[in-house]
Image (cartoon, rainbow, N blue to C red):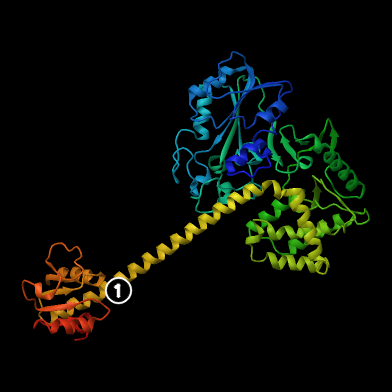
């Protein structure tokens, strides 16, 4: 990555390896050929994974047939375009097409439509259903659809029809706003209900489809992928869940192979301590394990929280189990700090925990830090932080395991490891910086909008008050048999008085106002001396100095002169 600070999120995307997440998990065949139309965003990754890569824009003029066509944001997805892609492929070829979902949830939150530049607008014709039909019309024999999350620009997870997210979607996506300050809210809080309603495939932010030329070819065996390309090179991995009931973990870069071997050793060590850990095999630079059809303990707890059935008794039961397993490592001289609810499966039938993906062990550190990290996760999780009992539960767990004295120190160490090893905040800082700046602008816009709304509400309230007061004036004039009035002052009160008087069949003979405002339908004069006829009364409407103005007019003309208050109070 360039050491120059990117000036926009767009520039950052062009240089960060995070852009590769949309396809760096895909099992490209060795020594394959690929034709790429992605603005060269994926060129480097493809060159490392395939034998021959050609990048192009517009139409490809060569005659070579390719194993893969990789197209990202290729413009309007027409049958003609898909037919051209089909023609570039050999008889066993595959199209990998990534594009923004025109009905993505982000557009319902106000994100600008990339084609129209306007918020809350959608473009028809490129839904998953429609593109699927067009792929068939173009000749493709089979399709497998994937849902990159957050989207196909900053992808950290890949879902498919065979492995959709549950309603407790881990909020691992990079939420961001790129040079776009129109979003009105953070849509992450809506994903749970979207998934509950079965709408994730329709409202996901992006699509990736694998379309095969031959009906005899099997679709990609990967059903799900987790991508940590945002981490430092030695900590960057891809974990795939496959349709042969296995899961694999590979290092994205060669620098990560040592850590992969360490993960294997960590699993062996935990097994020797009697910890119930998922067996793994290390061969050909990858870890292989069984695909487990169980929820993680984290997802199980979150489901109970969602159902309002999670209580202190259940938490004690579960964390007692975690503590029992962690305690088995007490004499190892290491802290296996990935022994947390997100890294273990839970079998509700027998109450067993099965730990997996134990990447890290910290030598010379209090083994209890793992338990502190497991408990501390409740405080920063998207689900639990909105629960009013979370802090109470955490306090009870700290006391139960006698962690209160050392909590701050161990929690600080756990946070440090999580930030440096798991999230790599330095790599994602530009995303967060651009987004924070955008949210700040949006908040400022929202505050200004709220101020304007409050001002309009106050103006409407004042207008209603003026109207009500002028109605009292009209009733008072009618009771005195006054039918012809002149209005002195044509501000807000004067204009409202005229409206009410005319609605009550009282003739307004003229308006007197030395500032000469625009008045339609009746005479306007600058002073009482210029009146062409004498009314039954002149009503003085200004608030400031009303009595003095009335006295001055009385000294000039013999016509009755009254302030608003005098009319009302008699």
Which residue is labeled 1 in the image?
465
Based on the displayed image, in which of its 4 quarters is residue 244 positioned? Answer: top right
Q: Residue at the right extreme?
A: 331
Residue 3 position in % (x across, y down): 69, 42
Q: Residue at the bottom extreme?
A: 570
Q: Within 10 angstroms of label 1, few (less than 14), some, or many (20 or more) residues?
A: few
Left-right relation of 465 to 516 = right
Q: Residue at the left extreme?
A: 533
Q: Residue at x 48, y 22 (%)?
A: 80
Residue 495 visible in this rendered orientation of the protein? yes
Residue 93 position in % (x across, y down): 63, 20
Quadrant placement of the C terminus: bottom left
Residue 565 visible in this rendered orientation of the protein? no
Q: Nearer the viewer, residue 101 or 161?
A: 101
Left-right relation of 196 to 551 = right
Q: Nearer the viewer, residue 338 or 45?
A: 45
Q: How many marks?
A: 1
Q: Residue at x 13, y 84 (%)?
A: 554
Q: Nearer the viewer, residue 253 or 515?
A: 515
């Amino acid at each position: 990555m360039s050491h120059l600070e990117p000036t926009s999120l767009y520039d950052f995307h062009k240089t960060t390896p995070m852009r590769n997440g949309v396809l760096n998990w895909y099992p490209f065949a060795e020594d394959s050929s690929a034709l790429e139309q992605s603005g060269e965003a994926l060129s480097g990754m493809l060159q490392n994974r395939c034998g021959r890569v050609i990048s192009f824009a517009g139409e490809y003029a060569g005659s070579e047939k390719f194993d893969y066509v990789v197209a990202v944001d290729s413009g309007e997805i027409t049958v003609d375009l898909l037919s051209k892609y089909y023609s570039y492929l050999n008889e066993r070829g595959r199209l990998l097409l990534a594009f923004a979902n025109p009905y993505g949830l982000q557009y319902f939150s106000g994100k600008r439509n990339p084609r129209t530049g306007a918020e809350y607008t959608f473009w028809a014709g490129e839904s998953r259903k429609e593109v699927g039909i067009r792929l068939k019309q173009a000749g493709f024999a089979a399709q497998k659809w994937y849902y990159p999350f957050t989207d196909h620009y900053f992808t950290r997870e890949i879902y498919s029809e065979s492995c959709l997210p549950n309603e407790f979607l881990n909020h691992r996506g990079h939420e961001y706003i790129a040079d776009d300050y129109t979003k009105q809210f953070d849509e992450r809080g809506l994903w749970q209900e979207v998934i509950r309603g079965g709408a994730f495939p329709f409202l996901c932010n992006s699509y990736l489809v694998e379309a095969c030329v031959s009906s005899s070819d099997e679709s990609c065996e990967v059903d799900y992928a987790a991508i940590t390309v945002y981490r430092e090179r030695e900590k960057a991995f891809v974990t795939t869940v496959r349709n042969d009931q296995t899961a694999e973990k590979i290092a994205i870069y060669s620098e990560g192979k040592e850590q992969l071997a360490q993960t294997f050793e960590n699993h062996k060590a935990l097994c020797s301590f009697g910890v119930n850990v998922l067996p793994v095999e290390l061969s050909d630079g990858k870890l292989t394990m069984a695909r487990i059809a169980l929820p993680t303990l984290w997802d199980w707890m979150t489901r109970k929280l969602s159902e309002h059935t999670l209580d202190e008794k259940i938490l004690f039961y579960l964390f007692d189990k975690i503590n029992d397993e962690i305690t088995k490592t007490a004499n190892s001289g290491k802290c296996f700090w990935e022994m947390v609810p997100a890294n273990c499966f839970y079998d509700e039938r027998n109450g067993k925990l099965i730990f997996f993906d134990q990447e890290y062990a910290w030598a010379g550190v209090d083994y209890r830090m793992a338990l502190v990290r497991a408990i501390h996760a409740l405080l920063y999780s998207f689900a639990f932080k909105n629960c009013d009992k979370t802090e109470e539960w955490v306090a009870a767990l700290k006391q139960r395991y006698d962690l209160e004295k050392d909590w701050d120190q161990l929690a600080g160490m756990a946070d440090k490891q999580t930030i440096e090893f798991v999230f790599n905040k330095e790599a994602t800082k530009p995303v967060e910086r651009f987004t924070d700046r955008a949210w700040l602008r949006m908040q400022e816009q929202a505050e200004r909008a709220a101020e304007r709304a409050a001002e309009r509400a106050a103006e409407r309230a004042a207008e209603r008050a003026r109207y009500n007061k002028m109605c009292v004036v009209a009733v008072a004039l009618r009771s005195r048999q006054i039918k012809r009035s002149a209005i002195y002052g044509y501000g807000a009160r004067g204009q409202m008085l005229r409206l009410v008087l005319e609605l009550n069949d009282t003739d307004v003979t003229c308006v007197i106002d030395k500032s000469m405002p625009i008045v339609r339908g009746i005479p306007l004069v600058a002073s009482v001396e210029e009146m062409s006829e004498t009314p039954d009364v002149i009503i003085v409407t200004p608030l400031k100095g009303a009595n003095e103005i009335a006295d001055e007019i009385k000294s000039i003309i013999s016509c009755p002169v009254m302030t608003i208050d005098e009319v009302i109070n008699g």
